[in-house]
Image (cartoon, grey):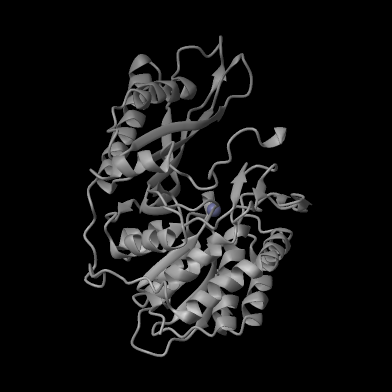
Amino acid sequence: MARFSAPFADVCRLTVAATFAAASLALSTSPVLAQTPAASTAPIPVPTEHAAVKRATDLVRTDNAWTLQQQTQICEIPAPPFGEEVRAADYKRRLEAEGLTNVRIDSVGNVIAERVGTGGGPVVVLSAHLDTVFPEGTDVTVKQDGDMYAGPGIGDDCRGLAVVLAVARAYRQADIKTAGTILFVGTVGEEGAGNLRGVRHLFEGPLKGTIDYFISVDGTGLNITHAAVGSNRYRVRFIGPGGHSYGAFGMPNPMHAMGRAIAKLADVQVPASPRTTFSVGVVEGGTSVNSIPFEATMDVDLRSESAQSLATLDSAFQRAVQEGLAEERARWPQSQRPVDVKIDTIGIRPAGSQPETAPIVVAAIEAGKALGFEPFTGASSTDSNVPIGLGIPAITIDGGGQARGAHSLDEVYRDGPDGWKGPQWAILIVAALAGAQ
Ligand SMILES: [Zn+2]
């Protein structure tokens, strides 16, 4: 189909490398954060021959239409940034319908449901994010054409939310018993300005210290994010009195100060591995061509796979801003008119990596192989940033199918011949981590 002549790609997450394979290679040399004592290095067996688990994986294949129906229905409930309540209330009802217990909405808006284990096993979270990037009022109607579903958020992350539900349902129907308790979760605030506030609360709020494994289902395809790309984002405002471009000439110009700072930032040298990047993404300011502006602002995005490299880059950025300001002041030594700068934080996401040999990563790869595919591993920015930053074993997995145009109004999800492999994979990984009995 012409519309889909470009290759489908998993673009919904903020994947750092062109391909997962490339990211994986680059990561093999990146520093590894110390694991908490809880993060055991013992391999986790994947119960590929377990009768009830097999039943569950058969069920999600048979019930594929149900999963797609959930995905569509959830997608048609708006969930703008900081406005996830309606979708959260609906998601709570869907989790309750799967017989889960203690289904609740926590103080920041996350939906949490429990499937209590028989005892003595780890606590495993399977989650997806409720929020979208689309503002209130966006038309979120889903249009279906065969196995193609078009609608804002249909892949990112309605796919993940549907997969989490499909797993809960299959566990109930197949009556899988696990030693550990499974928490099925819908998080708020994964995207942009949400700054991971939902998952942060999950690990810092009442459940602090109780979660042993974390899996986020985010995006489409069949790959694994095992390393967290950290980011520091800032809004920088250069301010001065402003004035007439001709009549008031001779005073520092906030826009010129910002230009100097941008030029300095643009020249900062960063390592290719661990991958470290910077960008001035938005510049604003000024009122007319014949005015010295009283304000100029820029939004800056700094990222790295390594916390240390991110800190180094952050210092270079701060220096660039201060030097830009100082040079603009020095350019007009006679001027009594002040120019100043104010830096506001837009978002901070922790960086961190865990080795590709970490038991949770190996278990996910083995589970994929058992289902007939070989997942790539890579670095990205997802809900898993928070647990990975804390040294808690965590991965973000794709939910199967394929999508294109994430974060755009033209987002499209295609289930393809084997979209059900996404929920099958999640079933198997959860069974391994929670200890199917
Ligand atoms: Zn997402």
Q: Between residues 56 and 88, which one lies in front from this camera angle?
A: 56
Instruction: Give the number of callouts.
Output: 0
In the image, taking residue 198 as reference, residue 409 lies left or right, namely right
In the image, taking residue 388 as reference, residue 163 lies left or right, namely right
Instruction: Find residue 367 and report its image quarter.
Output: bottom left
Quadrant in the picture for the N terminus:
top right
Confirm whether residue 201 shows in the render.
yes
Q: Between residues 59 and 288, which one lies in front from this camera angle?
A: 59
202 lies above or below 287: below
Q: Residue at x 66, y 81 (%)?
A: 97
Confirm whether residue 333 shows in the render.
no
**Residue with the most extreme bottom position:** 118
Quadrant in the picture for the C terminus:
bottom left
285 lies above or below 347: above
Q: Between residues 128 and 110, which one lies in front from this camera angle?
A: 128
Residue 357: give x, y in percent of width and height.
26, 57
Q: Between residues 94 and 236, which one lies in front from this camera angle?
A: 94
29 lies above or below 191: above
**Residue with the most extreme top position:** 246
Residue 401: give x, y in percent of width and height.
59, 53
Instruction: Find residue 301 and report its image quarter.
Output: top left
Residue 125: give x, y in percent of width and height.
45, 72
Q: Residue at x 31, y 53 (%)?
A: 352
Instruction: Find residue 363 and report its image quarter.
Output: bottom left
In the image, taking residue 168 as reference, residue 313 lies left or right, namely left
Residue 17: give x, y in percent of width and height.
41, 38
